Amino acid sequence: MDSKKLTRRILIALIAGAIVGMALTFAPESFFGPLDKYVLDPVGQIFINLIMMLVVPLVFVSIVLGTAGLGEPAKLGKIGVFTVTFFLTTTAIAITLGLALAYLIKPGTAGIFDTSNLDGYDPGKAPPIMETIINIIPENPIAAMSSGEMLQIIAFAVFIGIALAYLNDKTKGIFNLFEQANEILNWLIMLIMRFAPYGAFALIASAIGGAGLDAIGSMLSYMLTVIAGLILHALIIYSLAIWLLGRGNPIKFFKGFFPAMTVGFSTSSSNATLPVAMKTAQENLGVKKEISSFVQPLGATINMDGTAIMQAVATVFISQVYDLPLTMVDLLMVVLVATLASIGTAGVPGVGLIMLAMVLKQVGLPVEGIALIIGIDRILDMLRTSLNISGDAACAYILSEREKRKEKKA
């Protein structure tokens, strides 16, 4: 199926799903409940499961091919340092932007919020950052693959890729096998994407119908603040990075990457969108395959600019609702903790809310305040996933363009 035609169908499905979701907010629970349970949720989950089915093999195969394609470990090291630095820097900027907007718009003062009867919220516990770093090297690579431990899978794949690069002709057969596996996975991605419009419709209808117009209306100021942060970060930070560091056209970048952004919006998962994001970056943006194969899977694991903006806005929002002002030291701690937590909580389910709970505890705000935003978090999660994967692609694009310029000079 033509990519433009598929993107158009996904957009139509998203709009139709949003309209149906809003209509379902007026329907009685006795109607929406069974419809969501037996139709919308299963269709959406089947679509996500189909993509997730390919994520682990795709990440492993892509990282192996990407690392082997880069060849020299020194070159791999330079790309790795640039990638991690880019991700951490943009995350810190995203948090600062979110804090600034939250203080400018003051979403926590826009309505009357009853915090007296909020149920306690337990977001789970994130492992210490040092433990995460140590655990990057897997004791059992097969177990890491079966449990979807992305950082461990990436680490093991990098070692295999380096070995293939060093051994070269001795392992040509194995290298060819990985390339053939990559072709199979790409074919399966295109097959599964035919189902994307139906999955997108079901996911957005379920999200909006489940949140309800009352929840959306009462949290409108908070939502608009987060959305403003996401849009500004894309239009200013990513656009400047693409223009200044990659010497590219930001408009062409976002236009070319838009198909992947629509899938990210519908799935709310960077990992689930990864197969489509990599294919889109390589085919529409001309990103070199070996760079895309290394940078984008790593970004899907540790780059969370959209989530960082949400955390910053939510922290200030909760402080305003509870009337507990934050000091300048508190704000600096929010930036530091949230930036480091983007790596420390990599691969943890419900990562956004876990990171937010860590930040709230650090600055002495009640974690129970998270209950205020849970109702509409799924909708915002769709938007911030689109930003997250755009950041991954922007980094890959910049590195790819720099490599192309070096090759021309040589």
Image (tube, rainbow, N blue to C red):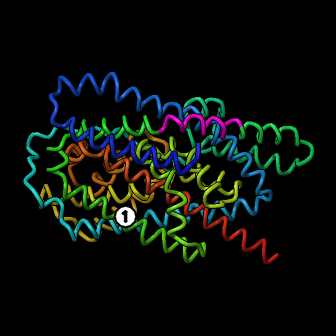
Q: Position of residue 153 (x, y in %)?
A: 63, 40
Q: Is residue 55 above or below residue 313?
A: above
In the displayed structure, does residue 1 sit left or right of residue 206? Answer: right
Q: Position of residue 240 (x, y in %)?
A: 49, 74
Seen in the picture, residue 327 relative to 48 is either above or below; the reply is below
Query: Is residue 189 located in the magenta-colored stretch of the structure?
Result: yes
Quick check: 1 above or below 166?
Answer: above
**Magenta portion: prevailing SS class:** helix
Q: Which residues are magenta?
A: 184-196
Q: Residue at x 10, y 50 (%)?
A: 113
Q: Is residue 135 visible?
A: no
Q: Residue at x 14, y 44 (%)?
A: 214
Query: Disc 1 on helix, strand or loop?
Result: helix
Residue 359 image point, x, y percent: 32, 54
Residue type marked 1: Ile
Q: Which residue is drawn at the image coordinates 36% and 29% (left, top)?
A: 41
Horizontally, residue 370 falls left or right of residue 409, namely left
Q: Residue at x 72, y 40 (%)?
A: 183
Q: Which quadrant, please, contains the C terminus? A: bottom right
User: Camera-side residue: 220 or 2?
Assistant: 2
Q: Which residue is mark 1?
A: 231
Q: Quadrant of the N terminus?
A: top right
Residue 215 in sight: yes
